[in-house]
Image (cartoon, rainbow, N blue to C red):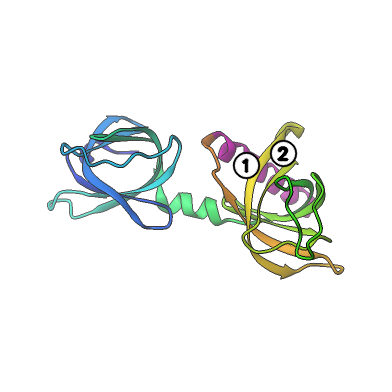
Amino acid sequence: MVLTDCEGCICEVKGLDNNLITSGTVKVLGEDLLEIRDEDGQMPSLNLDTKVKIIIHRNQALQKVQVLAARVYISRGTALQVRDLESYAEYEQRRFFRLAIDHSATLMPPSGMRDKAGNRLPYRIPVRVKDLSLCGLLFETEREFSVGDEMRLTMTMVNNEMEVLNIAIRRELPGTNGQNAYGCEILRLSSLGEQHLSAYMLEQQQIQIRKSRR
């Protein structure tokens, strides 16, 4: 990624919800590392690995805005360092691409959580994950949940390794064969977790392509 002509440019840092977090000037520290500076020390404190949107306003001669996706590396009062830089458009395509699957998984509700009918939920609940993306998933179950419920979901991915995803139910849908279906947002996905999820989705996509060619 060409970043050398971003040196000294003004930039905005936004969340993935497009809300402005901060602004400052860009310093290029490496091929995959930028620093956004604010000499007045007004930078907010952000958690390591927080995904952000970087909008770089290049100089008037270039008349071009560059938009990147990045992860927070170091956050302090006068500077914010971000890494894992990539085109925001490409990141959005990967993030929202949904893959239809039919995979067994296990929900692990918080201790003491109850369903819509007021019944205490067991610690482990088998479900079927029906589609998956980097930002969400849809699962089916006989159980009844409420929009806003947050839980953990475990499922095997690449090399049959178990992955744990933090999810929140965002919508309720009719499922198949009388099941309840729930569209969920994946919360607090780390850089490593995103890599594992991307690798699993690519593996499953390749399997589906091979089957379709038989």
Q: Position of residue 180 (x, y in %)?
A: 78, 65
Q: Position of residue 132 (x, y in %)?
A: 66, 53
Q: Nearer the viewer, residue 136 or 152?
A: 152
Q: Position of residue 22 (x, y in %)?
A: 28, 48
Q: Is residue 59 visible?
A: yes
Type of residue at label 1? Leu
The residue identified by callout 2 is 157
Q: Report which quarter residue 82 is drawn in.
A: top left
- Contact, mark 2 vs mark 1 (Cβ under 8 Å): yes
Q: Report which quarter residue 86 is drawn in.
A: top left
Span highlighted in magenta in the image = 192-214
Q: Secondary structure at mark 1?
A: helix
Q: Secondary structure at mark 2?
A: loop
Residue 125 highlighted magenta (yes or no): no
Residue 30, label in figure: none
Q: Earlier in the sequence, mark 2 or mark 1?
A: 2
Q: Nearer the viewer, residue 199 or 139?
A: 139
Residue 197, label in figure: 1
Q: Residue at x 20, y 39 (%)?
A: 38
Q: Report which quarter residue 73 is drawn in.
A: top left
Label 1: few (<14), some (14–19) or many (≥20) C-alpha neighbours in 10 Å: many
Q: Tell whether 33 sits left or right of 187.
A: left
Q: Position of residue 184 (x, y in %)?
A: 64, 57
Between the C-alphas of marks 2 and 1, the distance is 8 Å
Type of residue at label 2? Met
Q: Farthest residue toward the right?
A: 177
Q: Nearer the viewer, residue 124 or 103?
A: 124
Q: Report the magenta stretch's main SS.
A: helix
